Structures are given as C-alpha cells and as structure tokens.
C-alpha cells in the first residue's frame, strides 16, 4: 500500500504525520505534564483525588526509595500488580523515573501465571495489593524477586477513611488472606523513607525498554512485548489528535475533562490512553477499581459530569441493560472509545441511543503499543476498525506474503514507530511476527476498503478474546491435559453475546465418570477466571490432520455453523 493512500483519505484537520520524537522518553512527557497542570486533578479512586503535583511528589519519593534503599539498578524489572487505584500511577511513574522497566501484572493472575511472568521477566521487585499478597507469599520464593512492597486499597485515602476501608476489606469482606512475605515493606513506609532522600533523574534513551507487557502474541505461551519509550511516546502522539477531535469540540482548553477509566491500567490499552494521552493533555482520570460491581460503578458515575468514557463491548452491554445507568446525566459526554475486542453493531447503537454519544472504535495489539487504527470521532464507520493512525502503514498479504489489492481479504500487517522492539528473550518468536523490513504480522484477516477504512473479517490465529482479554488455546490445553483422566483436548472460542467469545474445551477422557465440572474446577485452580472454560464437551476422538495435529478450526466451525 503506497504511503499516500491512507493520508489522502484522512478527514480534514487530521494529520497524516506527526512528530513522534518530540519527547525523548515517557518520563519527559510526565515531567512536562505534572509541572504544566500541577494544580489540576489527575487521578481519583475510592473518593480520593491526587493532583498532578501530588503524583509528581509521591512518584519522586518512590523513585528516591528505589534508588537509595534497594539494590535495583537502571533496566531492572519491577512487577506491578495493582488494580485501578491512585497507587498505580505513583508506583509506575516512580519506577520509570528510577530507570526501571515496568512489568504490568494482572491482579487476577493465579500463582502459576504469576510465577511464569516473574521468572520470564527476571523481575527483581514486586509491588502488590494486600489482597494478592497471599499468592505472592507462595510465589516469590520461587523467583528472583528480592524487594516486595505491599499496599492496601485505602492507603491513599484520608487517615480516618484509610482505616475504615482497609478494615472492611480485611475483616468484613475477608479479602486478605494471611501472609508473611519475609522482609516486605509497606508502601506508605516506603514513601516516607523516600521523602528523606533525593530522587536523581536517570538518563533514559528513547530505545530503552520502558514496559514489558505480557501477551501470547499471535500464538502460544505468554511472552513479554518489549515496548520502548519511543513506542509509547509515539503511540501517545499518534492518538492525541484523534482523541482531541472528540474531546475539544468546543474549542476550549483541551485539558480539565473528566474521563471515566473502568478498564485496568495494567492493560496496554488503558495505560496508553489514560496514563499517556490523557495525562499529557491535563485531563482528570476517574479510576474504577472494580467495574464488574455495576451498582458501585454507577453510584460513582452519578458523582461526575463526565466528558469521556473508555470502554469495550462487554461493558457497554452490561451498563446499557441497567436501568439506573440509563437515568444518568450524559449531557456532558463528548467522547466514547472502544477497544480490546470487537464492537458489535447492537452494542454501539444501544450505547448511542442511551447516552447520545457515538462510539469510536479502535484496533491494536499489545505489540503496537497498542493503537494501530482508529475511527475518527465524527467520522466513524461502524463495523470497521477505522484508518491507520498517523505515521502508520497497513497492508494485507496472502499466504506467500504478497500484498493484496484494495477489497481483498488477507492477513493485516502494520508498520510504524509504535511497533514493539520484539519479544523479551525470544528472537525466534520475534522473527516470526516482525519481518526484516519492519512489518508486524497481526494474525488478523482484514480487508482495506476503497475509502481507507479497514474491516477485520476473521482471525488467522486461534486466539480467543474474552471481554477484551487475550486467551491462548495452548495455555488452556496445557492445563486441561494435565488432568490425569484427560487423554487429549482442544480449546476454541465460540460466540457469546456478553463477552464476545467464551472458551469451550473438547476433551477425550479415559474416565466415563469425568464431568464438565471436574474439568472447570481443575482449571479454576490454575487459570485466571476469564480463561476458565465455560463449556466442556467430551468426545471419543478429535479431528486431526494427517500428521496428527488437532484441527481447532474444524471444531470452531462446527460451533458457528
């Protein structure tokens, strides 16, 4: 696809190219924002708001502690296992200011998943919420982690509310299991200690790895996508004009908008949007720690005249089916962004009907930091993934790697400054995904339309997407096949109106008494909840190729026929 094809089709006012090198690294973006918007609210959670100046001060204290009171050095990995709390930006930006590489870790992970990620990344430090500390207690001894810092949910609340929140979580809800974690530190103590010393700025190059973001890639076991400072800064710069088309319709100050952030910041989609784009422009992120608690979520929404909402298909459906949500005031809502999973027409239409705000859908992968394409606000084409963001080329190829013309379906490939450096310590996997001339093969089958918009038509890979989270069949099958009564199995994704897809396992067993519940219970002990199969079907045999490879696609096609 020639360089001018897409740029000639961008809506007026949307640049085809921007200066993606205007900042050297993420910390430079952060430093500018916290000074420019010092008095503005930056992040709110559990009723407590931190200003940009607060984030600046607290993250500097955290960085100073890491530099002066631990053995951590520039480039070392620090795992951060936190939900959407104000502690997250303090810890993450503090770690980055100290020159460390952040390993975003899902708080819902099982011990097995934590152990893999910590060991694969070589993490030397861990910041964890008290509710997950029990798991960490059992996992940390099996890893290289030397420094463990624990925070309680209410730590950044006022003293009285802090005591109440932490008491209720521990003693009423019983969410914190006993843990010892020998030698661990409390986050509040760490910040006090850090405040006694001086944070020393670190020289971080644009090509230095900023974040190790774990994903299965196009196939297989979870591996760390190496996202450099340039990758993240570039994607922030690429997304900026698109989001401002929606948020700055009045022409007034682009900052000071209230943005609802229910998606986890540890997910690259929310991290780039909330912690990069919207922070760089001085906006106010209202963090939702547990969006699955719809009554609590809606109660929080009632407090705000919010201007933007970051969500995905599952969340839009759940909220629009709630009568209390429908009664909210949406008169200030200017921008709704969807990503992470395919947006259905019904969900988009219902959201616009309820809120009066259209949904702008984007597309991307962890490997593209993540935004590769987007529907410009006011120019959305429902059912498409929009056009490539600035400085980005897209093409579709056939099985032999030949570029296909407009209108023909092939594997979508992306090239741009947001494409990852590669997979952490996996050169073979990197070579399979990124060509020598820099094209990232997405594994998604797409069509490029005459008007420059693109449409995903199928997935080449076997990946399953459950509520925006990637689920890889290899991992499910590895766990299920570990059951003593299972001979072989296959995991596929089948359509689900709420979650987009759900996991179904086909299994061959030697035990006629084995039940579906036996399998799901076995999985629940070893997999995060969204990966656990919702359906199990026992068969005498599974379809295979002539060399014995199980044909997942044949099983999947049976379900959707």
Image (tube, rainbow, N blue to C red):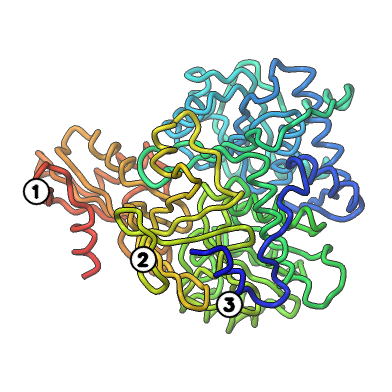
Lower sequence index among marks 1 and 3: 3
Judge whether residue 162 can be spotted in this image. no
Left or right of 390: which side holds 49? right
Q: Are marks 3 and 2 in contact (CB under 8 Å)?
A: no
Q: Which residue was labeled with disc 1?
A: 541
Percent x, y of residue 289: 63, 51
Q: In whole angstroms, how far apart are the C-alphas of marks 2 and 1?
A: 26 Å
Left or right of 504: which side holds 15? right
Q: Nearer the viewer, residue 547 or 347?
A: 547
Question: Which secondary structure, mark 1?
Answer: loop
Q: Which mark is residue 496?
A: 2
Q: Are marks 2 and 1 in contact (CB under 8 Å)?
A: no
Q: Is residue 70 above or below residue 349?
A: above
- Please tell me in which quadrant of the rendered image residue 375 appears: bottom right
Percent x, y of residue 337: 61, 67
**Would you call the spot at circle 2 few (<14 residues within 10 Å), some (14-19), or many (20 or more)?**
few
Q: In whole angstroms, how far apart are the C-alphas of marks 3 and 2?
A: 25 Å
Q: Which mark is residue 134?
A: none
Question: Which secondary structure, mark 2?
Answer: strand
Q: Which residue was labeled with disc 3?
A: 380
Lower sequence index among marks 2 and 1: 2
Q: Nearer the viewer, mark 1 or mark 3?
A: 3
Q: Residue at x 58, y 58 (%)?
A: 392
Give the position of the C terminus as an image quadrant: bottom left
Q: Nearer the viewer, residue 167 or 240?
A: 240
């Amino acid at each position: 696809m020639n360089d001018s094809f897409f740029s000639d089709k961008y809506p007026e006012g949307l640049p085809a190219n921007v200066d993606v090198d205007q900042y050297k690294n993420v910390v430079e973006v952060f430093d500018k924002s916290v000074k420019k918007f010092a008095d503005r609210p930056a992040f709110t959670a559990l009723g407590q708001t931190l200003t940009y100046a607060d984030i600046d001060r607290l993250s500097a204290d955290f960085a100073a502690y890491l530099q002066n009171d631990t053995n951590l050095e520039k480039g070392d990995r620090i795992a951060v296992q936190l939900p959407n709390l104000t502690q997250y930006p303090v810890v993450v930006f503090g770690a980055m200011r100290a020159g460390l590489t952040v390993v975003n870790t899902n708080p819902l992970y099982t011990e097995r998943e934590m152990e893999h990620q910590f060991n694969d990344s070589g993490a030397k430090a861990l910041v964890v919420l008290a509710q997950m500390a029990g798991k960490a207690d059992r996992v940390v001894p099996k890893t290289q982690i030397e420094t463990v810092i624990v925070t309680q949910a209410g730590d950044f609340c006022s003293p009285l509310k802090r005591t109440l929140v932490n008491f209720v979580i521990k003693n009423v809800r019983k969410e914190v299991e006993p843990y010892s974690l020998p030698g661990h530190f409390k986050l509040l103590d760490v910040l006090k200690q850090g405040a006694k010393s001086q944070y020393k700025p670190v020289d971080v190059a644009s090509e230095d790895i900023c974040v190790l973001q774990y994903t299965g890639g196009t196939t297989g076991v979870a591996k760390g996508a190496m996202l450099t400072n340039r990758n993240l800064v570039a994607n922030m710069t690429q997304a900026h004009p698109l989001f401002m088309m929606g948020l700055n319709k009045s022409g007034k100050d682009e900052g000071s908008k209230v943005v609802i952030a229910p998606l986890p910041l540890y997910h690259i989609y929310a991290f780039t949007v909330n912690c990069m784009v919207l922070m760089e422009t001085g906006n106010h992120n209202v963090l939702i720690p547990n969006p699955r608690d719809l009554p609590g979520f809606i109660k929080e929404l009632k407090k705000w005249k919010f201007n933007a909402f970051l969500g995905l298909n599952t969340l839009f459906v759940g909220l629009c089916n709630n009568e209390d949500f429908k009664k909210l005031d949406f008169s200030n809502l200017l921008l709704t962004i969807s990503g992470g999973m395919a947006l259905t027409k019904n969900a988009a239409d219902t959201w616009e009907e309820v809120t009066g705000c259209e949904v702008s859908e984007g597309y991307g992968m962890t490997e593209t930091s993540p935004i590769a394409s987007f529907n410009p606000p006011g120019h959305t084409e429902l059912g498409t993934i929009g056009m490539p963001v600035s400085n980005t080329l897209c093409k579709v190829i056939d099985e032999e790697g030949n570029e296909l013309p407009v209108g023909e379906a092939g594997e979508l490939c992306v090239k741009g400054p947001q494409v990852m450096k590669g997979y952490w310590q996996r050169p073979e996997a990197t070579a399979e995904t990124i060509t020598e001339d820099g094209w990232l093969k997405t594994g998604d089958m797409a069509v490029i339309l005459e008007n420059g918009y693109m449409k995903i038509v199928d997935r080449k890979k076997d990946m399953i997407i459950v509520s925006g989270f990637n689920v890889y069949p290899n991992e499910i099958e590895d766990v299920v096949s570990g059951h003593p009564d299972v001979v072989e199995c296959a995991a596929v994704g089948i359509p689900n109106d709420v979650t987009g897809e759900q996991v179904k396992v086909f299994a061959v067993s030697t035990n006629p008494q084995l039940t579906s519940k036996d399998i799901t219970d076995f999985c629940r002990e070893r997999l995060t909840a969204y990966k656990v199969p919702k359906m199990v079907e026992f068969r005498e045999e599974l379809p295979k190729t002539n060399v014995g490879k199980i044909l997942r696609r044949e099983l999947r096609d049976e379900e959707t026929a």
